[in-house]
Structure formats: structure tokens, C-alpha cells
Image (spheres, helix red, strand yellow):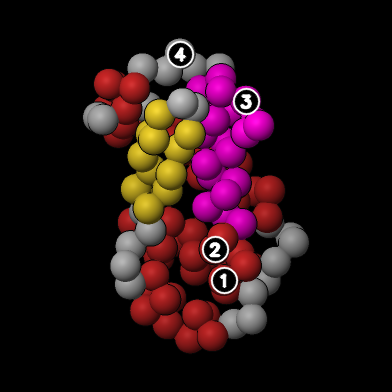
Amino acid sequence: MTEFDPEKFEEKYVHYFEELEEAYSNAYNQLHGRYDSTVLKAIDRKVLSESEPFYEGDGEFRVELPDDARERVGAVADHDQFDVVLEELVERIERELRRIFGFGPRE
């Protein structure tokens, strides 16, 4: 577990790069094999790579996605799993950030 400092999170890529990488990787691995790999990979490489995690306070994190998420993945956006996979990945990243920084699960 990494000691968390909200002020340092403003420069998250300087202070918490490894933790962010771990959260994103863990979320991806948790869904690997559960959903179509084409959808999962496209979201990971073209949407999440441009996402931005924010600390909201009280142990809560939010992952902001690029406005053009659907356009970034092209035809994959039409796949019936796209919205489900995207939503679950974001939820899992937020949960992983809480866990890594020692906040535990939401009440």
C-alpha cells in the first residue's frame, strides 16, 4: 500500500505513476477472458490511454474519459459489449485506486 497525499496527486504522473499503472493493469487483467478481447484491447489502448484519473476527496477517485471515446475505437463502438466493458473497466480502475492507496471499498 502506498501512502497517499492528495496534494501530490495533482502531479500524479510524477509521484504516483507506478500506482496508476498498477490500477489500470489490474482492472484490465480482471476483465481479460471475460469479454471479447477486441473490445477490451481497443478500449484499453485507445480510450483509457487518454483517460485522466482524479482524486475527488474522502477516498474517492474518478476516471474521466476523452469526449470522443466512441470515435477512438471505430467499429468496436458498435459491439454489444462496448458500453458494458467501458463502464466496468472504469469502475474497476477507481476501485483499484482506492485499494492501492489504502482507502478500502466504498461503503
Gap in Å between the C-alphas at discs 3 and 2? 22 Å
Q: Earlier in the sequence, mark 3 or mark 1?
A: 1
The answer to whether residue 43 is seen in the rendering is: yes
Q: Mark 4 or mark 3: which is in front?
A: 3
**Which disc is residue 86 wearing?**
2
Q: Which residues are magenta?
A: 88-107
Q: Secondary structure at mark 1?
A: helix
Residue 59 or 69: which is nearer the viewer? 59
Per the image, the residue denoted by label 4 is: 3
Residue 69 coordinates in the image, percent (x, y) = 39, 70
Q: Main secondary structure of the magenta part?
A: helix
Gap in Å between the C-alphas at discs 4 and 3? 13 Å
Q: Amino acid at mark 2?
A: Leu
Q: Secondary structure at mark 3?
A: loop
Quarter of the figure with residue 45: bottom left
Q: Is residue 69 magenta?
A: no
Per the image, the residue denoted by label 1 is: 83
Per the image, the residue denoted by label 3 is: 104
The answer to whether residue 25 is seen in the rendering is: no
Residue 11 or 25: which is nearer the viewer? 11
Position of residue 40 relative to residue 1, above or below, is below
